[in-house]
Amino acid sequence: MSGMNMLAFLPVITPLLAGVMILLARVGGLNLQRLLSLLSVLLLLFVALDLMQTAVQGVPQVYALGNWVAPFGIVLVLDGLSALMVLVTALLALPALWYAVTTKIDARGAHFHVLFQLQLFGLNGAFMTGDVFNLFVFFEVLLLASYGLLLHGGGAQRTKAGLHYVAINLIGSTLFLFAVGALYGVLGTLNMADMAVKVSQAPAEDVGVIAAAGLLLLLVFGLKAAMFPLYLWLPQAYANTSAPVAALFAIMTKVGLYAIIRVHGLVFGESAGALAHFYAPWVLGLGLITLLLGALGVMAARGLREQVAYLVLASVATLLIGIGLNSVEAMSATLFYLIHSTLIAGGFFLLADLIARGRGDDRFVSMAAMPQAVLLGATFMFAAIAMSGLPPLSGFIGKVLVLMAALDHPAFMLVLAIVLLAGLLMIIALARAGSLLFYNVQSDMPSGEALNKSAYAAVVWLLAAAALMVVFAHPLTQLTDAIAGQWAQAPFYVQTVLSTPAVGGTR
Amino acid sequence: MEILIAAVIGILTATGVFLTLRGHTFPVVLGLTLLAYAVNVFLFAMGRLTSGLPAVINPAQGGYTDPLPQALVLTAIVIAFGMTAFLIVLALKARGELGNDHVDGRTDGDLKPRTRRGAEK
């Protein structure tokens, strides 16, 4: 039992220790740092696979830090949802890191690998924690690391985008603390499971304060997830940073989505009385608006990286809609689409960088023909089909699952109309982008860099997900069904967390 | 005491929001700092306001102060301090690289972009 519980601690501690070791390994040179960094992420991938196997068995695993039991101590909780997020993070981090190493982007500034590991530490911590204040702390860890990564390599545009990104996230952190403080003031607890119990027992006069704090939390998570009207920071930040960082950031928006699913799904679930699922209509409505604006942004983008950033926004919006539909089928569809959109968006960012290197510019202007244009063009077409949700790739299956789940919802006509319209706009925009990038060439200009084959392997790793997720769609949907079913069993989660005894007897 | 603390939090927040919405980096940094102060006092007040009571349970004292918000405030102060330091350095870097201290890298009063590179928003 205790051995299994220890497992929940590994994805958090591995990148932290690796980060410290890489910092010390600076004396051994960049290659030693690269080796340690890659080994750490590889280890994380195996740990994540192991966690997934444990988590699908159905009982959430609880690890009490310092052997202080919930709700008094801080606990890490491993259930299907956390394990899935940790696994997706590791699957994304490995190719992103490989790309940074093979293109030598990590050599353009100090401490790239340290920041990368600390970013993973923050991400995994946020996915594993069962405590709201601890969630805030891990948010800060991943944000601080992301500030450093975003600015890595320097440049005036990057600094300006970084300044906006830092300022808006500091405001988000402040609002997070206001929400956590208000919830603690009313409920007297910070443990998520205990909060769910306390909300279900809350007297009528406290309901207003709890609802306000809950919506404030939704605002904070919406800011992280780039939900309308708080998405304006995303396109500039993602378009101006270096490619591997942008690829890793594909999981950053999903942290906000995860937090909505975890905190709001648990605390404001079935048992919350008057507040049960009160957030869902907000998430659905704002998700629909975000999707429409994201699709318009994809149409209006002036460069490929900016376009991919807006595609990330559109995929986040689709996930918000899935969360807002608020049913077990919709949650399963959301999780399937989440795996797809994270990996494909990461791959698309790396591909955009390879194309920009080949052409010398990623803006949609006439440039020289790039070397290996046929290979890159075919890859672009593959990524575009996956991202815009055309058959036969995984984006299509993901969207169909979300739309099928929407049929039971009263507003299904509106959801269907907007999702399909946004899909059409994205297809048009990507078709236009492809023809501008690959056909509109000037023969008298010198072409850019030759294709970096090892870096291209990272793109293949990520984009292969689109095909593999179709081939293994059945076991994968079974997995997401199981995770969504587990998520819907909030009382069981609460009971497991609150009744797990300390190791070596009760305290 | 409740009215005073509530007013302090309100004024700090209002000032912080106003300064954060300014166009230059220095007032923005100040505004974010004031917002951090406001939220620290708010967190502290969420443990209920008591005076002269210890933070550990002592039957002889007849009551206790909730120690958890104090621990939260301590964490929040440390994080806000680090973030502010980082933001100041970033603002200085932006001042050096963009040539002015406007948050969008523009000159004072002139809303036209300074350079063509700046025109790409």
Image (cartoon, grey):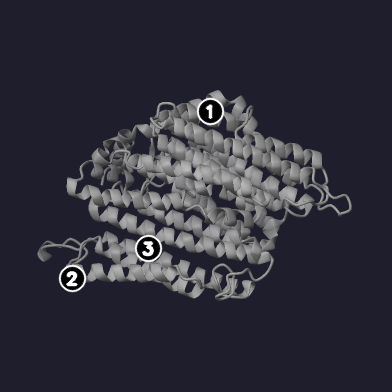
Tell me the residue that label 3 is attached to.
B75
Tell me the residue that label 2 is attached to.
B1
User: Quick one: SS at disc 3?
Assistant: helix
Q: Amino acid at mark 3?
A: Thr
Residue A193 lies in what quarter of the image? Answer: top left
Q: In the image, what residue occupies the spot 50% across and 38% down?
A: A318
Which chain is disc 3 placed on? B
Camera-side residue of A117 and A187:
A187
- Which tag is nearer the camera, tag 2 or tag 3? 2
User: Quick one: SS at disc 2?
Assistant: loop
The vertical placement of A84 against A360, above or below, is above
Residue A245 placed where, x, y %? 61, 53
Residue A76 lies in what quarter of the image? Answer: top left
Tell me the residue that label 1 is attached to.
A400
Query: Separation of disc 2 and disc 3 at Cα?
Result: 25 Å
Query: Separation of disc 1 and disc 3 at Cα?
Result: 45 Å
Which chain is disc 1 placed on? A
Q: In the image, what residue occupies the spot 52% across and 60% down?
A: A165
Q: Amino acid at mark 1?
A: Val
